[in-house]
Structures are given as C-alpha cells and as structure tokens.
Image (spheres, helix red, strand yellow):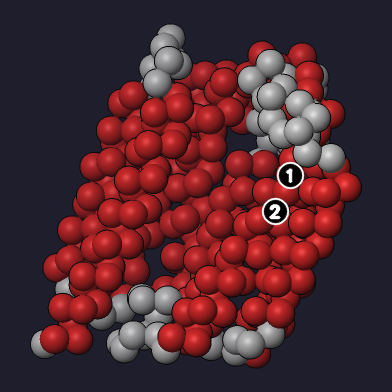
Amino acid sequence: MLLASDVLPNYLTIVWVILAMVGGRTAAMCLNRIIDADIDKLNPRTAQRAIPAGNIKKISAMVLTFLSFTLMTFATWQLPLICKQLLPLAIFILVIYSFTKRFTHLSHLVLGAALGAAASGGWLAVSGQITLPVIFLGLAIMFWVAGFDIIYALQDIDFDKEHKLFSIPALLGIKKSLLISRLFHLLTFLFLAAIGFIIKVNIFYWIGVFFVATMLIYEQSLIKHNDLSKVNQAFFMVNGIVSIGMFACILIDKIYMLML
C-alpha cells in the first residue's frame, strides 16, 4: 500500500485491506490444517497440531474457514473494481495450495504466489490498476517465500518420499534444493531492486533492499547440506526480521518523501 502511491493511503483503504488479509490468511491456514489433517497425523513433526491431536474438531475449523472467507469477500467488496475482479483468483490460489503437494513439486511457488498475491492486492487496493512494479512486487515475494519454504521442507524430505508427497527437496535432495532456494532469494533481491528503479523511492528503500539481501544471505548461511539443526531459526526468526525490516524502511522512506 505504501509503495503504490506518492501519498499515504486513506485510513478506510488500510482498514479494508487489513480485514481482507486477516480473513484470507485465516481461511487459508484453517483450510490447510483441514486438508492436511490425515497427513499431519502421520508425521511426527506435525502430529501435535490442533486437529490431528484432537484439540479442535474439523467442523469447527470449517466454520472458521467459511467465516474468514466471508470476511475477506466483504472487505474486498469495499475496494476498487480490480480487487473485486481478482477475488475469485485470490480465493482459488488460497484453496489450491493445500492440494499441490499431492501432484506437483512446485508447491513452494504456489505458496509464494499466494503471499505475493496478497501484497499485490494491497498495492491494487491503492492504485486500482495492474502495472509492472506491482507484478515485480508479487514476483519478489513469491520467490522469497518459495526460497524459505524449500528450506522448511528439508525437515520432511524422508517423510515426503515415503508417502509420495511432492516437494523440491523430495525430488532433488538437499544440496540441489539449497541451490534452488539461493537462486530464488537472488531473484527476490533483483525484483525488489527493479521496483526501486521504476517507481519513485529514496535512500531508505534501498537500505531496505540491501538489508533484505544481507538477511537472506545470513539465512542461507545457517543451513548446510549436512546440518539442518538451524532450520527453524532460519525459517521463523530471519524471515520475520526480513518482513518487519523491509516494511520499516518503506514506511520511513514514504515519510521522508512526504517531508521533502
């Protein structure tokens, strides 16, 4: 939203975008847990998740999924026409992801597309039109997410092979998967940099871009083909810092621009 305009978005747009995001993410996470409940029960790493552990009933998760998609739809309907037109596509991506590990090794990219579409949706809610920078933003986030999801999937490489589930680690092994993850994160940096050359930004945006690059290099350094002990540190901590740090730099850049 901050990148999409030379001015700050109005408060109602911010409210509706946040509600759409909360609804969409909650629905997608619930649906993922419902669809994967039987698989999660078999996997020692995920057996204690709420549904397989019996802490939450599937029907309760289904009700929350329905209510969350309803919230997403209602909030999106308060946004520009392009957001309404793309709503079915957004819901399709959120739904289809949970099935992709059953038929394609590219499931990591589908997950990335879901999060990339979310950020692009925030941009479209402000600008109302599809342009090259918003496409680059979606691609940057898609490759960022796919890159760290490959790292996360390394934990389940043996389980995925045994149960004939699809992932890049299950297909290519650890070494080649790490190379692809690094390539994806390089593409993240390149697309973020490309945005900075296309739209009007200042120094703080570029600080954010190189901060992201530094953190992704650090993330990749934590994982070795013969040592996966720091996967959770790389996956949860580093990527949380990446997202918060980049947002902070974009916000400061926007405030600085408005003060000029």
Does 217 sit above or below residue 225? below
Please state the horizontal and vertical placement of residue 48, each as a whole percent of the image.
69, 24
Tell me if mark 1 has few (under 14), some (14-19) or many (20+) residues whose alpha carbon lies within 10 angstroms of its own.
some
Choose between 136 and 119: the one closer to the eye: 119
Q: Is residue 230 above or below residue 120?
A: above
Residue behind mark 1: 32
Position of the N terminus by quadrant: bottom left
Residue furthest right as drawn: 59
Q: Which element type, helix, strand or loop, lies under badge 2?
A: helix
- Residue type pointed to by label 1: Asn
Residue 199 percent across, percent down from the top left: 31, 78
**Amino acid type, residue under disc 2 in the picture:** Ala
Q: Quadrant of residue 117?
A: bottom right
- Residue drawn where x is 21% and y is 70% of the image: 252
> Can you name the residue that lies furthest to the top here?
226
Residue placed most toward the observer, 56 or 93 = 56
Q: Which corner quadrant of the image does residue 162 belong to?
A: top right
Left or right of 200: which side holds 230?
A: right
Q: x and y percent of residue 171 in the render?
A: 66, 24
Residue 28: image tag: 2
Quarter placement of the C terminus: bottom left
